[in-house]
Image (cartoon, grey):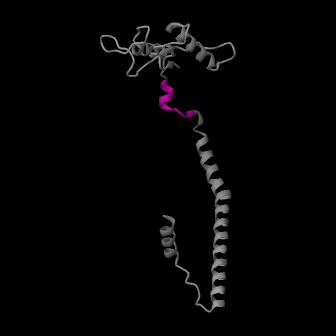
Amino acid sequence: RTVLALTHGGLATTPPGTDFGGYASQRVRSLRRAVPAGRGPFFRPELPAVLVENSAECATDPSGRRVLPDSSVWVQELAATLVDVALKGRPYVYRPSMTRRPNHSWRWAVPLLAAGQAALWLKVLKPVMDKDEERLAQQDEFVWRAKGIERQRLGIGAPLRPSKENAWRLEQMYEDD
């Protein structure tokens, strides 16, 4: 469901030795060749192409519609091509069974997936996170002990360790910067 829309279709001057129709068809052919083939090497759909031009310099017909150098109204051609492409596809087929139980075929897997998630959390993720939190607490304790030893060596009082609430507030204050 693709339409090639080639812009600058109102090109007033074409390359020497070509007319507007030949130049436009050459551009369309080269772009169609550039689009990769789908569904095997022998199937290459004929992509519809439309020339479009909406610049202020584009010529207009007496009713004010923008026209290309071959005097075709490009908006009408674009709309007609889009309608053709839309109508060419397969129509939607309503299946009532899908509205009643859309995921009936995999419904049995939901409890297994929930149990798997719970097991993953309890057996893998939670122990790793607990161990990490414990390691961070040990490092924090080591830092405060080292600070205490250093302050004692200098003859200063013990370091004032903030409470958890104050530590959280300080962390929030300096984290926002």
Instruction: Count up the numbered dots.
Output: 0
Can residue 46 be seen here?
Answer: no
Residue found at the very far front of the displayed protein: 16
Residue found at the very far left of the displayed protein: 63
- What residue is at 52 percent from the left and 69 percent from the top? 171
- What residue is at 62 percent from the left and 92 percent from the top? 155
Q: Position of residue 51 (x, y in %)?
A: 47, 15
Q: Position of residue 172 (x, y in %)?
A: 49, 67
- Residue 132, placed above or below residue 96: below
Residue found at the very far bottom of the displayed protein: 155
Q: Position of residue 100 (x, y in %)?
A: 48, 31
**Magenta stretch: dominant secondary structure:** helix
In the picture provided, is 68 more to the left or to the right than 30?
A: left
- What residue is at 52 percent from the left and 78 percent from the top? 163
- What residue is at 68 percent from the left and 12 percent from the top? 42
| Residue 17 location, quadrant | top right
| Residue 77 location, quadrant | top left
Viewer-closest of 61 and 175: 61
Q: Does 164 appear in magenta?
A: no
Viewer-closest of 46 and 7: 7
Q: Does 103 appear in magenta?
A: yes
Q: Position of residue 165 (x, y in %)?
A: 49, 74
- Residue 74, placed above or below residue 123: above
Viewer-closest of 50 and 149: 50
- Residue 134, placed above or below residue 7: below
Can residue 110 be seen here?
Answer: yes
Highlighted magenta segment, given as a residue range: 95-104
